[in-house]
Amino acid sequence: MFKKLLFLGLILSLAVMMIGCTPPTPKADLIVLSLDPPDVNCGMVGPTVLCTNSATFTIANVGAADAGPFKVLIQGDPGLAQTKVIPVTGLAAGTTKTFTAVALPAGGNCYDPDCTMCITVDSLNEIIESDEGNNNYCETTLG
């Protein structure tokens, strides 16, 4: 009887160890890798001056799993009110993607007097990530 209990205890211990040793599920981790200073082009439209602000930036998936489709939000001054959303079809683990001269809708001059641009990857939280707190990056360029 004692041997049976000892054997049963050994089996239960092994089962607990096996459950505790299950590796975590790999997850994506999307970040903004770089953001260049903004490009601002202003011109007259009738009596009004309209400016187009554009951004060049690179995002990366530094996680251990591929990311499916997600959206990137770009915001620019004045008051971060100029916005554009870019759909991304996905990003494999360990890769980067650069977006060049993405124009925000025409509006005010970003330099008011300084120009702040913000990039948020996975802006709608569509991807389950290993770190959800590193998806946003802002940079201010002095005017």
Image (cartoon, grey):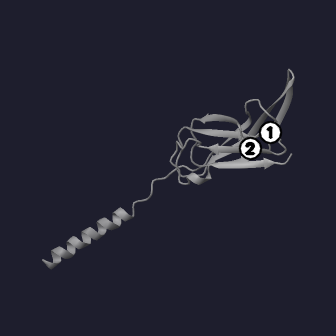
Q: Is residue 108 left or right of residue 99?
A: right
Residue 72, position as x, y percentages in the image? 63, 39
Instruction: Examine the rendered structure and indicate whether residue 135 appears above or below residue 3.
Output: above
Rendering quarter of residue 19? bottom left
Specify the amino acid type for callout 1.
Answer: Cys
Identify the image quadrant of the N terminus: bottom left
Q: Nearer the viewer, residue 133 or 99?
A: 133
Question: Crowding near pointer 1: few (<14 within 10 Å), some, many (20+)?
Answer: many
- The residue lying at 18 percent from left, 75 percent from top is 5
| Cβ atoms under marks 2 and 1 closer than 8 Å | yes
Q: Which residue is mark 1?
A: 110
CA gap between label 2 and label 1 equals 9 Å
Seen from this angle, which residue lies furthest top?
46
- The residue lying at 77 percent from left, 39 percent from top is 78
Residue 44, position as x, y percentages in the image? 87, 25
Residue 23, position as x, y percentages in the image? 43, 59
- The residue lying at 54 percent from left, 37 percent from top is 69
Q: Nearer the viewer, residue 11 or 56?
A: 56
Q: Which residue is mark 2?
A: 117
The label shown at residue 12 is none
